[in-house]
Image: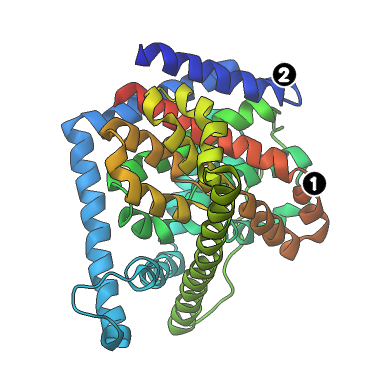
Amino acid sequence: MNYFISILGLAVVFVLAFIASNNRKEIKYKNILFMLVIQLVLAYILLNTKFGLIIIRAVARLFEKLLEYAGEGINFVFGGLMNEGAYTFFLNVLLPIVFISVLIGILQYTKILPFIMRGIGFILSKVNGMGKLESYNGVASAIVGQSEVFITVKKQLGRLTSQRLYTMCASAMSTVSMSIVGAYMTMIDPRYVLTAIVLNLFGGFIIVSIINPYTVGSHEDFLEIEEAEKQSFFEMLGEYIMDGFKVAVVVAAMLLGFVALIALINNLFHLIFNLTFQQMLGYVFSPIAFLMSIPADEIVDAGGIMATKLVTNEFVAMEQLSKMAGHFSPRTLGIISVFLVSFANFSSIGIIAGAVKGLNEDQGNVVARFGLKLLYGATLVSVLSAIIVSFVL
């Protein structure tokens, strides 16, 4: 029965993407089918095989060690503020972003990261039927982040058509930044974080290939990566340390505001309608949870968490999921976890539009105009990844 519902879910996702397509004749069905098979195979390997378990454990152990090293710096600066054994979200989850940001800066400075991103992007362009720029951007978004990625391709922004710009923005919204992957792994099972990152990369290309299909001519298939401004090693370290700290503080501020606002709205809804705002959202999103083959007695709670992610951000939703983990079966927990690992939410529209506008004002205005369609596509990517995982759990 679960397989039947998951197949139905896939069909609904593709129909919803097809309805929003701006050029149905250009859709490359063969590439889409190939990437869908790749998603299923990768999900099975990562979640159901010994080889996948070894990879997951290795990556989880790597981030565990990185978080331990980050903890040394946090304890040195804030140790006196922490009670023995106490858990503080800002200190334990957000501040390690600073250290991860430093490591990304070092890999960028030594040219290791650009080499990896170009190489993987080139291989992906042979699979997805898109241009080298789009393929590079999908990989780069998953490593350097949804706003920072546009800095690396700012030379080309002014020459991009609105179609190519949509593809690049959709990739940025569908993925997550490696700098905060460690934070995610402290909140949900690391195997679902890693699986979601891989699936979202291909899922982004699949959905965009349906919603926004086009063919890149050989004369347009250019890739010019913006070289970082020449800096000394320690100048670079200082810049990435501050960038990481800004991300941590911004996320903390958004969480403070969103969590408090949701608490207020929940209270008001409970007084007026005798149900919380999240319960109401849960009923609205329950059909989507059903299409992920989540059991009927869990779809309302699951829908509420997914909706929370869409209207706030993934951190708020993950925090709620960790509190409600006991209400869900292990399979449902895995499906919801994969759905949550992306930047697909309303605030990302402003972040991406602002990032592009800061580099090219005209193109930033273009992004702002298709903002809702951007969120629509990125949300379908998250739903698709969750459905793919439902086949193998």
In which quadrant of the rendered view does residue 128 lie?
top right
Q: Is residue 208 toward the left or the right of residue 290 in the image? A: right
Pinpoint residue 79: horizontal percent, then vertical percent: 26, 84
Between circles 2 and 1, the one closer to the viewer is 1
In the image, 328 versus 91, the foreground residue is 328
| Residue receiving disc 1 | 369
Pinpoint residue 153: horizontal percent, then vertical percent: 64, 56
Is residue 148 at least partly visible in the picture?
yes
The circle drawn on residue 121 is none
| Residue receiving disc 2 | 24
Real-space CA distance between mark 2 and mark 1, rounded to the nearest whole angstrom:
21 Å
Q: Give the position of the C terminus as an image quadrant.
A: top left
The residue depicted at 31 percent of the width and 36 percent of the height is: 328
Q: Is residue 253 toward the left or the right of residue 366 in the image? A: left
In the image, 340 versus 298, the foreground residue is 298
Q: Is mark 2 on a helix, strand or loop?
A: helix
Pinpoint residue 10: horizontal percent, then vertical percent: 50, 19
Q: How crowded is mark 1: few (under 14 residues within 10 Å), some or many (20 or more)?
A: few
* Residue type, mark 2 in image: Arg
The residue depicted at 33 percent of the width and 41 percent of the height is: 192
